[in-house]
Amino acid sequence: MEQPVLRQPLTTRHYPTNGTTLTMGATIAKRIKAGSRYVHSPAMEDPLLARVVLMVLCFGFIGLFLLLPLVAVFFEAFRKGAGVYLATFQDSAARHAVFLTLTVALIAVPLNTVFGLASAWAITKFQFKGKQILITLIDLPFAVSPVISGLVFVVIFASHGWAHPLLENSVAGLAGGLPILGQNLAAWFAEHQAVLAQGFWGFLYHEWRIQILFAVPGLVLATCFVTFPFVAREIIPLMQAQGNHEEQAAISLGAGGWQTLWRVTLPNIKWALLHGVILCNARAMGEFGAVSVVSGHIRGQTNTIPLQIEILYNEYLFASSFALASLLAFLALVTIVVKAVLESLTRADIEES
């Protein structure tokens, strides 16, 4: 390959054999296409001192404020031995906290996934008034303190709240108001009230009221409020960059709406969607402020893992507190590993395409 004269201004390169002169961008493109290496220039390098200072600053900050506390959590959890560590999880309150945390995450994450897909589809595929307002509102949980979001649900669903009259006698009222079979359904609920109230969903039938605060629905609502931007914010920029061309091509070839969604849209955004779901799940399991306000801190009933950790720590049960904290930290590490794997798969997918 013909090599250009090296001592040229940075913006142009002159090729003496054919008399052509290319701009710097065209020269770089030509070299990339030919597989050649760039001409080394000291001016293109970052100052060594700046690189060293920035790298030391970054690694020092991460080590001091992230890695060191994480190592301290696992050290304190196992300091009194594996027996004490495992005994923490034999406590019924601790096991219920783990179960409740996973339950809330299993309900909140799919809800936010559906909302994220719907909002991303509406924002990127349609033109409508108020689109910018919708985008701004999606970011609202990032700006609002989780404690404030919990207090909002207290204002709405507490005994003096706006929605409390609607929740009173709601099951019987809804069943009795249905046409034809309404009265029969109300009678069936009355007959089986005692049995239904003893099951997992008994909170729905307890005293014929739908219990929101100090129960699972309140925890789910608070968690959904705090975590709903994660999925939407991951896929909206990607769908905006991809545009509508492939969907329009699929529709022009006779594909229906669901076929376009399953065979065109979802495959294109699958890695970003999974990335958002993982971040949403991590935040849902570790949420403290919002669920603390709406939970009531009822041990063995409404305490998630973060709330149980706080209670144990305040009772000076440090080994049990750090044992539960290590479980939460382990789940966070698993999330980071899965996130890194997804990012690697995304890069490989982009390179193949």
Image: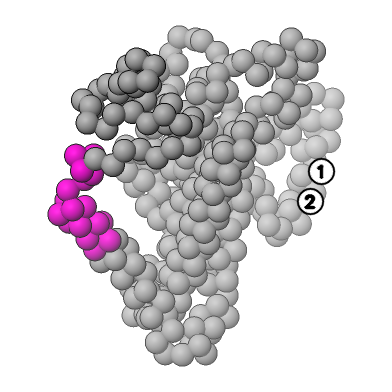
Give the SS element for disc 1: helix
Residue shown at 43% from the left, 53% from the top: 287
Q: Which residue is mark 2?
A: 192
Left or right: residue 181 compared with residue 113:
right
Q: Which residue is mark 1?
A: 188
Q: Quadrant of residue 296?
A: bottom left
Q: Quadrant of residue 198?
A: bottom right
How far apart marks 1 and 2 lie (CA) works out to 6 Å
Residue shown at 49% from the left, 48% from the top: 279
Q: Residues within 10 Å of mark 2 (few under 14, many from 20)?
A: few
Which numbered circle lies on residue 23? none
Q: Are marks 1 and 2 in contact (CB under 8 Å)?
A: yes
Residue shown at 64% from the left, 47% from the top: 204
Residue shown at 18% from the left, 53% from the top: 48
Magenta span: 42-60
Q: Position of residue 274 (x, y in %)?
A: 58, 43
User: What is the magenta segment's predominant secondary structure?
Assistant: helix
Q: 11 or 169, which lies in front? A: 11
